[in-house]
Amino acid sequence: MKKILIVAATAGLMSLAACNGGTTNTTAENVAESHEANAAIYEEAADNTTNAVAENVLENAADVEENKADAAEANAH
């Protein structure tokens, strides 16, 4: 009887371990997508402005958002 319980428990733990391998961090993926969307908005605003200083500020903000997206994507996997 004890051997049956041990075998059943081992099989259960092995099946749980097999299921855990395919998970991804969807929160980090969502954060990355959000930062990418923000970067696109900043880039579009930079393209539409006539002020060179404002354009530089917006392009820098877009770069910051892209860096944040890259960092979030790195944490997603």
Image: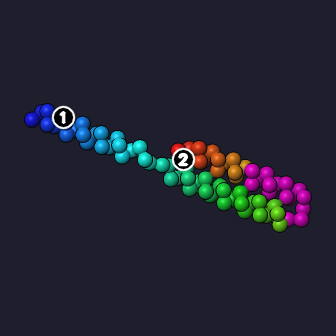
**Mark 1 surroundings: few (<14), some (14-19) or many (≥20) residues within 10 A:** few
Q: Which mark is residue 76?
A: 2
The residue located at (24%, 40%) in the rendering is 11
Q: Secondary structure at mark 1?
A: helix
Work out whether 45 lies above or below 18: below
Amino acid type assigned to the residue bearing label 2 in the image: Ala
**Main SS, magenta residues:** helix
**Is the N terminus in the top left, top right, bottom left or bottom right quadrant?**
top left
Work out whether 40 lies above or below 13: below
Spatial separation of the CA atoms under disc 1 and disc 2: 36 Å
Image x and y of residue 26, in percent: 50, 53
Q: Quadrant of residue 62?
A: bottom right
Dot 1 or dot 2, earlier in sequence: 1
Task: Please say whether residue 60 is one of the residues in the magenta stretch.
Answer: yes
Is 1 in front, or is 45? 1
The residue located at (22%, 38%) in the rendering is 9
Work out whether 75 lies above or below 61: above
Is 45 in front, or is 1? 1
The residue located at (60%, 47%) in the rendering is 72
- Please identify the residue farthest to the top as the structure is shown: 3
Q: Which mark is residue 6?
A: 1
Amino acid type assigned to the residue bearing label 1 in the image: Ile
**Mark 2 surroundings: few (<14), some (14-19) or many (≥20) residues within 10 A:** some
Q: Secondary structure at mark 2?
A: helix
Image x and y of residue 34, in percent: 62, 58
Task: Please say whether residue 3 is one of the residues in the magenta stretch.
Answer: no
The residue located at (55%, 53%) in the rendering is 29
Q: Which residues are magenta?
A: 49-63
